[in-house]
Structures are given as C-alpha cells and as structure tokens.
Amino acid sequence: MNTVPVYEAKNKLPLFIHQAEQGNPLAITRHNNVVAYLISKEDFEELTKGGKKEKSLAERMQERRKEYGLEDDDFDYTEYFDSLRERGYYGRPEGDHVFDGV
C-alpha cells in the first residue's frame, strides 16, 4: 500500500483516485501518522457489506427462546413491548405519577 502525506494527496488527488479505482489503496499521513485511507468504491462496499444491523431486544429474546426450546408458544415480544410503550411511564396510565398522593 502506498503512503503519501496530506499535502501530496491534495495536490495529486485525481491521480490517487484513479489508482484507488484500479485496486491500489492509499494511506494518507500527517506527521508520519496514518490519518485516512483512499480506497475504491468496491473495496468500501465490501468492507461495509458485512456490517450487521443490531438486532432489537425482542429479536434477541426470540432467538434465546429458540435456543432453550421455548419457541413453541406464540408469544410476540414486539407486540408486548409496544403495548408497554402505550401505557406510559412504567405501565401506569398517562397522567399518573409514582409520587402522586404522597
């Protein structure tokens, strides 16, 4: 991998972009420390393609239930959590507060 300082990358950017498109990534340095990489679109997409979307709590709970053999019941955690959100703060009806009447 080629390494160039920032000022050279700035002055010759079209050349370095063409090289990256040809599959030759470039490390860009400032004071001899790598601060950035110039890579092709294909390389970038390949790197980011594997990134997994984080699963919701409900999805993770369903997976754990399957691991323990509890998937036979039709409990829907997504629906359950949605119903909790609708009830307001800690399952109390809207307007009720934990310190009311104290």
Image: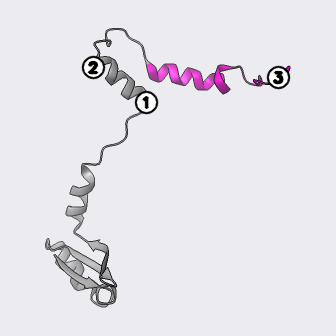
41 relative to 49, above or below: below
Per the image, the residue denoted by label 1 is 57
- In three-dimensional space, the C-alpha distance between marks 2 and 3, rounded to whole angstroms, equals 43 Å
**Mark 2 Cα-neighbour bin, 10 Å: few <14, some 14–19, many ≥20:** few
Which numbered tag is attached to residue 67? Answer: 2
Amino acid type at image mark 1: Leu
As for residue 98 lying within the magenta part, the answer is yes
Which of 68 and 20 lies nearest the eye of the viewer?
Answer: 68
| Image quadrant in which you'd find residue 98 | top right
Task: Residue at 24% x, 48% y: name it.
Answer: 50
Query: Does residue 80 appear left or right of residue 85 in this picture?
Result: left
Amino acid type at image mark 2: Glu
Task: Residue at 21% x, 56% y: name it.
Answer: 46
Split into 4 quadrants, where in the image is the C terminus? Answer: top right
Query: Does residue 81 appear left or right of residue 39 in this picture?
Result: right
Q: Where does the image place residue 85, in percent across and percent down from the top left?
A: 59, 26
Disc on the earlier residue, 1 or 3: 1
